[in-house]
Structures are given as structure tokens and as C-alpha cells.
Image (spheres, helix red, strand yellow):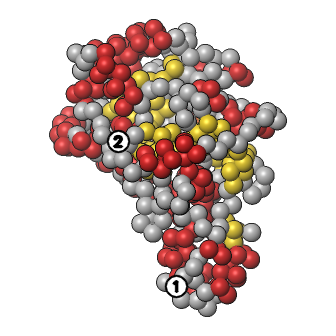
Amino acid sequence: MLNALDYNIEEWQAILIEMGEPKFRAKQIVEWLSKGKDFHEMSNLPKMLTDKLSQIFEANSVKIHSCVVSKKDGTRKYIFSLSDGNIIEGVLMSYKYGNTICISTQVGCRMNCQFCASGLDGLIRNMTSGEMLGEIIAVNKDISEYGERCITNVVLMGSGEPLDNYDNVIKFLKLVNHDCGLNIGKRNISLSTCGICDKIYSLVEDMPGITLTISLHAPYDDLREQLMPVNKAYSIKDVMKAVRFYFKKTGRRIIFEYSMIAGVNDSIDCAEQLVRLVRGLPCHINIISLNYVEERAMHGSDKNRVQDFLEYLEDQEVSVTLRRTMGSDIEGACGQLRRSVMEGAKCESVVDQDFTQEYADAAKVECEQPSYEQESSQEQDSNQAQDSIQAQDSIQAQDSIEEQYASQDQDAIQKYNINNDDN
Ligand code: SF4
């Protein structure tokens, strides 16, 4: 069976014409599929057509195998099964301003970052665009009683390196952004890469406007090469050149992810080098203490170390957020739960009606964010600080901050262009 979600409107039109059907039905089919409906539920299509289609296509080849809900913060970690028997994972995080899903783009990963469980078995295969879309549609269906579109933000930060599966990822981004489909805005989509530079340049042409996130994790080459073998192919200098280009062409502030690993990259010396690296580039740094991955024998930095690192960056007026470790009680690190399931650990499906309602409600609440000044102020009292940390701990938050300060960004772009005309 073919996965119906793999096709865009134009491809559906061609399929329908081939079948002797009017091409306007393509839009109807895509709309129904995006709501998670099966062919027999497409009530405005003739039964003869839906019967024919259901013999050839599967409405969504991605099925929820199981779901585990964090008792700490409500994060929902999904295991999905694919039609060839492979399994992947995704994570849903709920905030008062919406629901963010982190999806996988490959089965496994060949980048072999030394702190990550997803790369332990290498790359099994690329996922198709329809399989990526299927993750979101399956979760929308799972958390909404009436098929509403509850997911407001998408992050490509699960298993796999998105830019190593470039064509399928670009097709997925166009599908998820399409107004007949899920219609998720580019500003609500974030792609995280370990730094495949030539594809960053291509992204400017093929899908400008999404948020680009760089998994940095080390501020100088020797250390980054130890942690992330990709750095041998693309040095930090290459990465910084590519992100400057991305910013210059798109005006989108760059996000850097920095997982703090005890005794490895958490010194003040590292913080100093990090400041030097990003100085002058409109960007934001997310720091987080690494989720422990047993096979990698690496531990996250302790709270004091993280706090010192954070304060150093703030003192240097770097835009930085300390992110909460989401879902740490449910094997929250990339690839961990999938490995547990593959190794036969018990993974019970949890259906919790309260959580379900919470997610549905979250999608309806308008975004209320603290201002950028509040975020970086040294004078906030402890209550404000607590509120701010809770409000800041998502990529949605970063995006909202960016939207509020779009005009600041425009100034920054102008200044940046003036200072970098020679580059
Ligand atoms: S961190 Fe990302 S790129 Fe690196 S091995 Fe894990 S999934 Fe792959």
C-alpha cells in the first residue's frame, strides 16, 4: 500500500486525472487526510472513488505504537510504528501558548554524536515526507476529541539529521505549511541540524523563513570533533559562515543548542569561547543539562555549574535561556525510548483524559510572552525569574520573542549587513 500523505496537491491532481476523476477532488482529499480521516470517512467524495483509493493507498501509514506520559511535566513521548516494521519516536510538549511536537526525520542516524542514543545503531533508513507528516496527524488525532488541529509548533529535532534527508524534509515542510493541509506557519517550524553546511545554503533557497537551530554543544573544534564527528567535515568556522549567510538572507535569528555535559563542555572557559563565537550575530542560545544516556556514559552538568554558565552568558549580554529537561522520567533524550522498546522494555500506552483536554485547551490559548528585556534583565526578582524560566522553555517562546521584536531584528539586520558587507 502507498502512503497517501506522501503526495502533495499537484501529485493528487495527476493521480485523479489518471483515474478519470476531476482534479478539484485533490484539495478535498488533502484536507481530509490532514484531519486524520480514512477514505471511508471522506463524506463529500463518491463512495466508488473512496473504495478505489482505499485499495491503493493507506490514509496514514504511521501508527501510534504506545505513548508514555511524564508524571513530572505532562510531556507525552510517542513510539510510532511504520509500515515496514521500523519504529521511531516523537515528543509532545504542552505550554500555555500551544503544543509543540518534536518529530523524527530518519530511522536511526549516521551522525554518531557521542551524547545521543539515536546514533548508536547508525542510519537504518530515511523517512518519507508523508511519514513525517503522519507523526503530527496521528498525535493530533490522539489528543483531540473532535479532530481539531491541536499542534501549533513543529520542531525537527527527534531522531535523525534532517539535512541528511534533505529532499524528503523539504517536501514535508511544504506539505505541513500548505494552507490545504495542516497550515502550520514557517515561523512556527524549527529545524535543528548538527551543521551540514552546504544544505544550510540550499535551505535559504528552498524553505526560507523557518527557524534554523544549530546543535552546537562545543565552542571550539577539538572538543566538538570529539563530541560530534560531523565537525571533521564542517568545522565551527564553516558552520558560523553558513548561519551568518542564513541570517543575512532570511532575517531569522539563529538558535544554538548547547547541552551541558559534566566535566566536558561546562567550564567558564567554554562559556568565554562561546561568547566570542556568537558575538555580533543576532542569535539565541538554549542551554540544557544533558539527559543521561546509559550507553554513552555521559552525565548532565549539575545545577550550580549550569547556573554559573548561564550567568556568565547573561553578564556578557548574550540572549540565553535555560531550558527545563522535559520528560526526564520517561527517557526524554533523543532515541532513548525507542531503544528501550526495541530491547523489549515494557512500554504501556497511557490514555489520560485530563491531559488530553489540557492539550486541546492549550491550542486555543493566545500566546502571552514576557518581553525580551524581562528575559535578560538582571534585576528581576525571584518570582519573576521563575515565571520567566517557565515561559521561556520552548522554541515557541523564542519564536514569540522574535515576533515581538521583529523591528529590532530589522535594525540588527541593517547593522549586521553594514558590518559584514565584505563577507
Ligand atoms: S544528536 Fe541529532 S545528528 Fe547527532 S546522532 Fe543524535 S539525532 Fe543524529
What's the residue type where badge 2 is placed? Asp
The image shows residue 249 at horizontal and vertical percentages of 31, 48
Give the quarter of the image for residue 78. top right
Q: Which residue is mark 2?
A: 399
| For marks 2 and 1 on the same chain, the one whose residue lies earlier in the sequence | 1
Q: Is residue 403 left or right of residue 101?
A: left
Query: Which one is in front, 344 or 200?
Result: 344
Work out whether 37 lies above or below 221. Answer: below
Image point (36%, 21%), residue name: 386
The image shows residue 304 at horizontal and vertical percentages of 45, 8
Work out whether 361 lies above or below 375. Answer: below
Give the quarter of the image for residue 69. top right
Image point (68%, 51%), residue name: 64
Q: Which residue is mark 1?
A: 23
Q: Does the closest atom of ligand 1 sit within 8 Å of the Cβ of label 1? A: no
Mark 2 → mark 1, Cα distance in angstroms:
37 Å
What's the residue type where badge 1 is placed? Lys
